[in-house]
Image: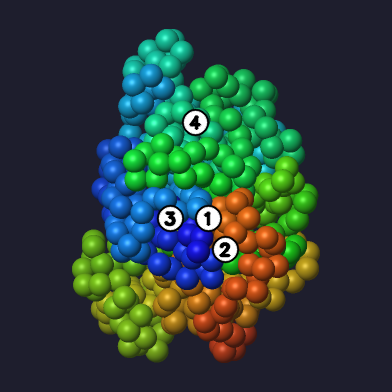
């Protein structure tokens, strides 16, 4: 029996999952880690803490499966994508906390570049919009503000990368400095057509190529693990978390679409061998690169999805456990006139407004926690619907079906609200951990455990389906209210100043 170990390094926790050849889970480990908020709008992680949480998860998964490292055939990695790590290649130590994808500290730099008329130039080369979300301005901020980074750069020992780069560096004990293609496509430094670092972009952001990792494919022999727990096991699959979920959901054909409901919500559709340039400010991105052939995707990112439920639990104490939100929201027939726009980290696609802030409108003396809970679920679904409507315009053909996964997709009420608002048939995967599954299947393909995409498609199973039940008149009115609320949330930080 062959076993694949998937390492899923997320925004709030690290997980390790062991799969057998039938894609059955044999062992798991998970370890949460601290979120660091140095200033409003800033989000950081300690890279060493991330690694230790990953290592604990690996050990727990192996122990639960009663397997030794010699039983693992391959390692697959998936990760939070735009989060940036910088470290010293000689000491192997981080020079600064990782700057997380949610971080907004480079909003001013993005606005400056936009004012210089560079947004279209960057977008045409990268498929991305100009936003603090992506890694390039994070690198520039480190180089401009952290003395230790300037010193290491002068000495030639500074290196950087996304989380996949950091994990591979740690797994190989500093022998391998790489970045996988889908992760590289989220940096604003990769040419989307050539899938290589772009010299003009490097000059624009004033980033030396010497500190960047080498770009590798998504399913190939990348390196050998050197840590005692996984000595000699090949790393053969890597993809950014949302691309891994697209692969794990077997969205192999043009038009195949998925949405992952995690900390944020991420909608991707397969666009095939050529990138689709969005007219609606969606992202063109590498989905995966296998056998030197690139598959592309169109993506819309919602920054706050499941994190909104965590906020209701941790900050407002509306519920004690996240799982209680569904029953509370279902205890009322509607939102009682309340609209909640969860722009805590600005708004992602299709607005791309880093100055937007969270807004609750329509409060009255009759408003209850149940109304706010209902409005929160609707706020998640509305943001996804904004992306779907933009994607319909870019793809020309009407989308009719969407596969969903991620922790928040287990909420039946949320999925029904989603189906009502976006008028799509929704299939929820039997295995909600499509991100880890995608990393495992990429790794398995890389060593021949599975010999084709068609074999993987045969193993995918739906758990439940949802279709539109609400009347079009009702959903149209709700959509109009939502769009009015979004306008009030936008540009808030500028107005405050």
Q: Which residue is mark 2?
A: 248
Q: Which residue is mark 3?
A: 71
Left or right relative to 310: residue 465: right
Category of crowding for the residue at label 2, using alpha-carbon neighbours closer than 10 angstroms: few (below 14), some (14–19), many (at least 20): many
- For the residues labelled 1 and 4, the Cα–Cα distance comes to 19 Å
User: Mark 3 vs mark 1: which is more N-terminal?
Assistant: 3
* Circles 3 and 2: CB atoms closer than 8 Å: no
User: Mark 1 vs mark 4: which is more N-terminal?
Assistant: 4
83 relative to 9, above or below: above
Location of residue 37 by image quarter: top left
Q: Which residue is mark 1?
A: 439
* Circles 3 and 1: CB atoms closer than 8 Å: no
Q: Is residue 110 visible?
A: no
- For the residues labelled 3 and 1, the Cα–Cα distance comes to 18 Å
Category of crowding for the residue at label 4, using alpha-carbon neighbours closer than 10 angstroms: few (below 14), some (14–19), many (at least 20): many
Q: Position of residue 391 (x, y in %)?
A: 67, 62
In the structure shown, which secondary structural element does the residue marked by tag 1 occupy?
helix
The residue closer to the viewer here, 316 or 100, is: 100
Category of crowding for the residue at label 1, using alpha-carbon neighbours closer than 10 angstroms: few (below 14), some (14–19), many (at least 20): many
């Amino acid at each position: 029996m062959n076993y694949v170990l998937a390492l899923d390094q997320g925004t709030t926790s690290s997980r390790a999952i062991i799969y057998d050849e039938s894609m059955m889970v044999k062992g798991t480990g998970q370890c949460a880690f601290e979120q660091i908020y140095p200033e409003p709008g800033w989000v950081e992680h300690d890279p060493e803490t991330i690694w230790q949480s990953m290592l604990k998860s690996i050990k727990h998964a192996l122990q639960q499966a009663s397997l030794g490292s010699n039983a693992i055939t391959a390692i697959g990695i998936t990760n939070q994508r735009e989060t940036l790590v910088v470290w010293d290649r000689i000491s192997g130590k981080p020079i600064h906390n990782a700057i997380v994808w949610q971080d907004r500290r480079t909003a001013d730099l993005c606005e400056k570049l936009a004012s210089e008329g560079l947004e279209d130039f960057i977008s045409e080369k990268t498929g991305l919009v100009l936003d603090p979300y992506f890694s390039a301005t994070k690198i520039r901020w480190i180089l401009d503000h952290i003395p230790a980074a300037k010193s290491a750069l002068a000495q030639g020992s500074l290196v950087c990368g996304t989380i996949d780069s950091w994990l591979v560096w740690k797994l190989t004990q500093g022998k391998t400095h790489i970045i996988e293609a889908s992760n590289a496509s989220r940096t604003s430094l990769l040419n989307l057509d050539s899938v290589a670092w772009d010299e003009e972009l490097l000059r624009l952001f004033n980033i030396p190529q010497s500190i960047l990792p080498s770009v590798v494919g998504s399913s190939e022999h990348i390196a050998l693990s050197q840590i005692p727990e996984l000595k000699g096991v090949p790393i053969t699959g890597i993809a950014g978390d949302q691309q891994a979920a697209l692969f794990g959901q077997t969205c192999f054909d043009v038009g195949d679409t998925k949405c992952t409901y995690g900390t944020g919500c991420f909608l991707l559709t397969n666009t095939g061998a050529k990138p689709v340039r969005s007219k609606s400010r969606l992202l063109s991105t590498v989905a995966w690169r296998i056998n030197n052939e690139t598959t592309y995707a169109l993506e819309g990112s919602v920054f706050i999805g499941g994190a909104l439920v965590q906020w209701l639990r941790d900050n407002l104490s509306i519920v004690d456990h996240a799982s209680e939100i569904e029953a509370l929201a279902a205890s009322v027939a509607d939102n009682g006139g309340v609209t909640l726009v969860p722009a805590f980290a600005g708004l992602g696609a299709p607005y791309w407004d880093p100055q937007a802030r969270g807004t609750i409108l329509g409060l009255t003396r009759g408003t209850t926690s149940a109304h706010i809970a209902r409005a929160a679920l609707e706020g998640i679904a509305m943001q996804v619907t904004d992306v779907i409507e933009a994607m319909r315009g870019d793809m020309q053909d009407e989308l009719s079906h969407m596969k969903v996964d991620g922790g928040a997709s287990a909420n039946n009420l949320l999925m029904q609200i989603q189906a009502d608002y976006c008028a799509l048939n929704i299939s929820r995967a039997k295995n909600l951990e499509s991100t880890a599954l995608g990393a495992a299947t990429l790794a398995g393909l890389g060593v021949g455990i599975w010999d084709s995409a068609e074999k993987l498609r045969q193993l995918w199973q739906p758990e439940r389906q949802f279709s539109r039940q609400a009347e079009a008149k009702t959903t149209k009115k709700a959509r109009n209210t939502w769009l009015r609320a979004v306008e009030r949330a936008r540009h808030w930080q500028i107005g405050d100043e």
